[in-house]
Image: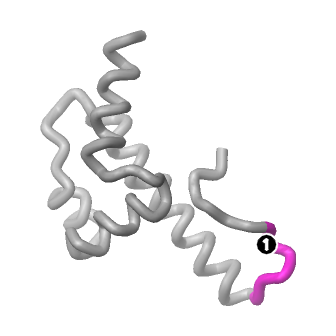
Amino acid sequence: MDVLKLDSNHNLSEDERTARQHKTERLRRILNYIDENYSDKVLLSEIAKRENLSMTYLSHFIKDNLNQTFQEYLNNIRFSHARD
């Protein structure tokens, strides 16, 4: 599943492909961390620190790529696990 809003990579420069790959890897790390720790206290500030990002940048990064806020995503993960 490609969680980023990306178009086809065929018309991208090598630098653009690399940037997208880094973005995808970052998002996967963040989502994996949330998925592995959803039952604990998960803080945006802790994830930002782990990724060496500001909380503002991380908040926008998540919103831009998931079309939901960090808290909405976390709540949805928790709800999904509770439902299962």
Picture layout, residue 50 above or below residue 66: below
Q: Residues within 10 Å of mark 1 (few under 14, many from 20)?
A: few
Which quarter of the rendering shows the C terminus? top left
Residue 68 screen position, x and y as percent: 39, 50
Task: Determine the image quadrant of residue 74.
Answer: top left
Residue placed furthest toward the right? 10
Q: Which residue is mark 1?
A: 9
Q: Looking at the image, what colour scheme do you see?
A: one colour
Task: Determine the image quadrant of residue 5.
Answer: bottom right
State left or right for residue 66 relative to residue 34: right
Judging depth in this view, the residue of 62 and 14 nearest the camera is: 62
Q: Amino acid at mark 1?
A: Asn
Please say whether residue 12 is one of the residues in the magenta stretch: yes
Residue placed furthest toward the top? 84
Picture layout, residue 35 above or below residue 25: above
Task: Tell me the residue at 66%/44% (across/down).
Answer: 1
Residue 10 screen position, x and y as percent: 86, 75
State left or right for residue 29 relative to residue 46: right
State left or right for residue 35 relative to residue 17: left
State left or right for residue 53 relative to residue 25: left
Q: What segment is highlighted magenta in the picture?
A: 8-13
Picture layout, residue 38 above or below residue 53: above
Circle 1: element type: loop
Residue 64 screen position, x and y as percent: 45, 64
Residue 17 screen position, x and y as percent: 70, 78
Task: Determine the image quadrant of residue 53.
Answer: bottom left
Task: Tell me the residue at 80%/68% (across/down).
Answer: 8
Task: Tell me the residue at 42%/47% (across/down).
Answer: 31
